Image: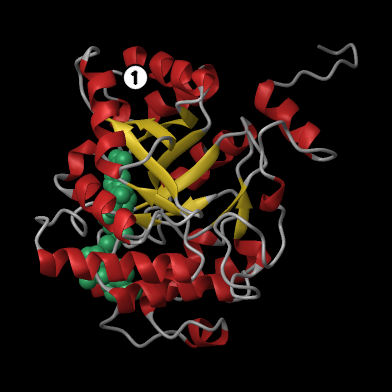
Amino acid sequence: MGNGEIHMNRRQFNKLLLGTTLLPGVPQANALTDNAGAGAAPAGQIKSSFLKQIPVSGESIPAVGMGTWITFDVPPHTKPLNQRTEVLKKFFATGGSMLDSSPMYGYAEQILGHCLTRLDHPGSAFSASKIWTPVESQGPLQMQTTENLWTVKQMDLMYVHNLVNWKAHLPRLREWKASGRIRYTGISTSHGRRHAKLEELIKREDFDFVQLTYNMIDRETEKYLIPMAADHGIAVVANRPFKRGNLIDQFSKRPLPSLAKELGCSTWAQYLLLFVVSHPQITVAIPATSRPDHMDENMAVMQMEIPDTATRNAMLKTI
Ligand SMILES: NC(=O)c1ccc[n+]([C@@H]2O[C@H](COP(=O)([O-])OP(=O)(O)OC[C@H]3O[C@@H](n4cnc5c(N)ncnc54)[C@H](OP(=O)(O)O)[C@@H]3O)[C@@H](O)[C@H]2O)c1
């Protein structure tokens, strides 16, 4: 160093390249416009500021996705299946794209597969799941099961869930990416766990997405992990935006701040979610819901103006 050379890793190089051109294989339709292709809402619905870029590819993706832990872990019977299909229908109708699941979530992957089949696999769906097993040889079997349950030919993103045996699974994810079986690799964590290890992996390993917990109360990750991931060209997915619904329950006992109304939020859920997705380095947040009306409410956040840093700080002072 000190000789005027600029050192950059592969992702930083890709990012630079994307300033002028698109990488091979990256769909042109994903440009940042109000009526972009993959994942976009009907014209004008999603504000372009809520279409975030995946650093490694430049593909853009709507900032509100959907989680499935508990909410989609229901037996495949007619009534729950109909209701979850309605939830997903709303999700796609309002410009949704990223769906997040895991073999850890009981029936969730199976239910997703049923619903996606009923909806004829909307082209904007971005499928994300995880490998979650300490046993190396189980990884490929789990992958096969995930593809079968989701009824998809190619998963978009596969994470190592909660860092479980990442040493064995991460190289395998890279192989699958190289062969075209998946499009992106990732590592997930939550509940503020294993941050030191995650920091080490962000610095040392090569993967495209990190999933971690970030919400208006749990903000430890914004101090160093989120900026560090962004610096390394890693997309950041925020899980538990409502802390499994607890934040909504807790805050709903208070009146909605006037700032929330000024920003266009009519509920605490919208205010909490707007805060998360307006972080410039958060790529997608994945709130979970079992209710179509809640899905509409959550997706409507992407039709609001995105708050700037000063407004986000003011939001924090209201809670
Ligand atoms: N290690 C990991 O990889 C990891 C760990 C944790 C979570 N995750 C992912 O992150 C996702 C989200 O986290 P989470 O499931 O903990 O919870 P969350 O999204 O923070 O909260 C979900 C809860 O919020 C309620 N809710 C959603 N929208 C609402 C609205 N507009 N009004 C009122 N209530 C609303 C839901 O109830 P209703 O059904 O009644 O709407 C549900 O009980 C998970 O589903 C999972 O996909 C990953």
Amino acid type of the residue tagged 1 in the rendering: Trp
How crowded is the residue under tag 1: few (<14 C-alpha within 10 Å), some, or many (20+)? many
Q: Is residue 245 left or right of residue 236?
A: left
Whole-percent x and y of residue 212?
Answer: 39, 42
Label 1 within 8 A of ligand 1 by Cβ: no
Whether residue 44 is visible to the viewer of this picture, yes or no, is: yes
**Residue at position x 46%, y 30% in the image:** 182
Q: Residue furthest right?
A: 4
Residue bearing the label numbered 1: 166
- Camera-side residue of 86 and 205: 86
Q: 42 above or below 61?
A: below
- Camera-side residue of 263 and 152: 152
**Residue at position x 38%, y 24% in the image:** 197
Whether residue 317 is visible to the viewer of this picture, yes or no, is: no
Q: Secondary structure at mark 1?
A: helix
Whole-percent x and y of residue 270?
Answer: 43, 74
Q: Is residue 239 left or right of residue 9?
A: left
Whole-percent x and y of residue 112?
Answer: 27, 52
Task: Using the rendered view, name the quadrant where residue 42 is placed.
Answer: bottom right
Whole-percent x and y of residue 187?
Answer: 40, 31
Q: Quadrant of ligand 1?
A: bottom left
**Residue at position x 71%, y 57% in the image:** 32
- Camera-side residue of 319 and 164: 164
Q: Quadrant of the C terminus?
A: bottom left
Q: Is residue 151 left or right of residue 181?
A: left
Task: Using the rendered view, name the quadrant where residue 34 is placed.
Answer: bottom right
Q: 135 above or below 274?
A: above
